[in-house]
Image (cartoon, rainbow, N blue to C red):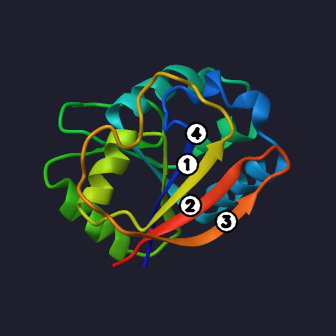
Amino acid sequence: MRKIVAGLFISLDGVTESPQNWQRGLMDAEAGADVGEAMEEADTILLGRRTFEEFAAYWPNAPLDDPFSAYINNTPKLVVSNTLTSVDWQNSAIISGDINGQLAELKQGHGKNLGITGSITLVRSLLRDGLLDELRLQVYPIVVGSGRRLFEESIGTLPMKLVDSTITTNGIALLHYQPAR
């Protein structure tokens, strides 16, 4: 059985938007290894529409020697959207309609994890609907002040269980949670 696992960079004040603007100088080897581990454990990437459009505008033309560029361009991508009608980025397909049913079916299949990068609206909905199996947060020691936050909208009370934690050399808290069902 496959798992849906989300990995997010998040500031101390809960901002997840545009981490490239605030986390790069703080990332260290341990945080990079955490990202690398998530990439190795996933064979499919789930993306929300907004993140997909941002990534599709950048990553197909990014330097080929960037490890994330090679990973994201070559790994199958599923875009969760009821508004997109086509995608032209290689290895991409759209999931629409009964999204929860399709994701539940994918989880029953064989393969590695379905990994989510960014896509906070998607992460919120999967948490709310009980489809997210693990939430991996990299909490950076910085207050950003403004930007979209992971829990801007109420998803109700959702008890989580901490299953792994590490504090890196630069003070990044690597926190892996699973819903406490």
Q: Secondary structure at mark 2?
A: strand
The reply to whether residue 88 is in sight is no
Look at the numbered discs 1 and 2 and tell me whether their residues touch, using CB distance below 8 Å. Answer: yes
Could you tell me the amino acid type at mark 1?
Thr
Q: Mark 3 or mark 1, which has the lower sequence index?
A: 1
Q: Secondary structure at mark 1?
A: loop
Q: Which residue is mark 3?
A: 165
Instruction: Provide residue 126's location: percent of width, then percent of height.
Output: 30, 56
In this rendering, position of residue 180 left or right of residue 112: left
Residue depth check, mark 2 versus mark 3: number of the one nearer the observer: 3
Residue depth check, mark 3 versus mark 1: number of the one nearer the observer: 3
Gap between marks 2 and 4 measured at Cα: 27 Å
Q: Which residue is mark 4?
A: 12
Could you tell me the amino acid type at mark 4?
Leu
Gap between marks 1 and 4 measured at Cα: 31 Å
Look at the numbered discs 4 and 3 and tell me whether their residues touch, using CB distance below 8 Å. Answer: no
